[in-house]
Image: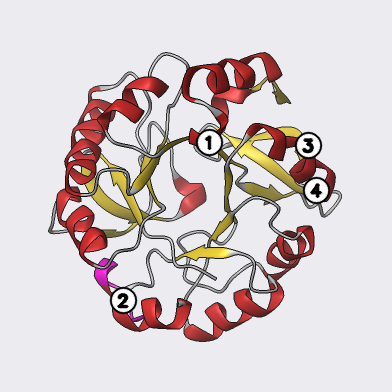
């Protein structure tokens, strides 16, 4: 189990938010706003030699705030070229530019899901632009009470698609991506514990391509459970609970645990 670092950017600032709360009008419920800029975290992760992290741009694409997010992200990538993947508003119009800015991969969800369905034409167009080895699919999901299944969500986790996150879905989409990033949206940012059922599902798939889980990590017991339930095949990112984001889990101890 590898530790995957993160930088979430909202209004040009590094923040930790409650995952399902992001709203274009109301903003978001915020756990932490960093004193340091994104470049500080880029430098920190480079010095600790922990690549494969993700930068998520949380504002709506096309807004002035989104441009501020891009500015901040570019500063982080200057500090750690090739050390980050970047997601949030990625389309065929900007994917190549993010790679040129220094991202190792682009992360996409909403662009490849249209009207709740997988748009394979868009997916293939992205592969033709940046290559499968530079594409990460964000399959972040929420559970529906009606049937107890996990559904992939889009538009900053506000809209349910018709696609169930299942072993068959993971198999099918693995032909189009280098990695998966999967937030358990119902627990993301709440520091209330992990989604063990989702982790068991991911662990049973066997990580045929790399899979990073995010959501709810609040203790070293949570990390132990992820390692156990995920059969030591699932990587992890920790946000609000981490000491560098105002939490109680010491950053260096987390790195040591995940080695």
Tell me the residue that label 3 is attached to: 172
Which residue is at a point 78% across and 43% down the rendered structure image? 171
Between the residue at mark 3 and the residue at mark 2, the CA separation in whole angstroms equals: 36 Å
Per the picture, the main secondary structure of the magenta-coloured stretch is loop
Mark 3 and mark 4 in contact? Answer it, CB < 8 Å: no
Magenta-tinted stretch:
244-250
Q: Nearer the viewer, mark 2 or mark 1?
A: 1
Q: Position of residue 219 (x, y in %)?
A: 47, 82
| Numbered label attached to residue 166 | 4
Question: Of callouts 3 and 4, which one flags the residue occurring earlier in the amino acid sequence?
Answer: 4
The quadrant in which the N terminus is found is bottom right
Question: Of callouts 2 and 1, which one flags the residue occurring earlier in the amino acid sequence?
Answer: 1
- Bin the neighbour count of mark 4 within 10 Å (Cα to Cα): few under 14, some 14-19, many 20 and up: some
The quadrant in which the C terminus is found is bottom left
Between the residue at mark 4 and the residue at mark 2, the CA separation in whole angstroms equals: 32 Å
Tell me the residue that label 2 is attached to: 251
Tell me the residue that label 1 is attached to: 133
Q: Nearer the viewer, residue 26 or 147?
A: 147
Q: Is residue 4 left or right of residue 69?
A: right
Q: Nearer the viewer, residue 51 or 143?
A: 51
């Amino acid at each position: 189990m590898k530790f995957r670092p993160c930088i979430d950017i909202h209004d040009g600032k590094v923040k930790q938010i409650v995952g399902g709360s992001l709203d274009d009008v109301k903003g978001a419920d915020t756990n932490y706003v960093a004193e340091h800029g994104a470049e500080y975290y880029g430098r920190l992760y480079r010095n600790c030699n922990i690549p494969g992290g993700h930068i998520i741009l949380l504002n709506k694409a096309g807004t002035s705030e989104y441009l501020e997010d891009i500015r901040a992200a570019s500063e982080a990538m200057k500090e750690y070229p090739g050390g980050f993947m970047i997601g949030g508003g990625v389309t065929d119009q900007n994917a190549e530019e993010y790679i040129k800015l220094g991202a190792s991969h682009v992360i996409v969800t909403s662009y490849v899901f249209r009207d709740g369905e997988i748009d394979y034409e868009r997916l293939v167009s992205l592969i033709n632009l940046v290559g499968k080895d530079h594409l990460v699919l964000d399959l972040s999901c929420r559970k529906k009470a009606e049937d107890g299944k996990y559904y992939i969500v889009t538009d900053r986790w506000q809209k349910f698609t018709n696609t169930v996150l299942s072993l068959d879905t993971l198999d099918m989409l693995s032909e189009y991506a280098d990695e998966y990033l999967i937030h358990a949206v119902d627990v993301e940012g709440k520091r209330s514990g992990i989604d063990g059922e989702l982790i068991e599902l991911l662990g049973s798939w066997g990580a045929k391509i790399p899979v990073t889980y995010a959501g709810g990590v609040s203790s070293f017991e949570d990390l132990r459970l992820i390692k156990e339930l995920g059969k030591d095949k699932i990587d992890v990112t920790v946000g609000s609970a981490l000491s560098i984001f105002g939490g109680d889990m010491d950053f260096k101890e987390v790195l040591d645990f995940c080695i």
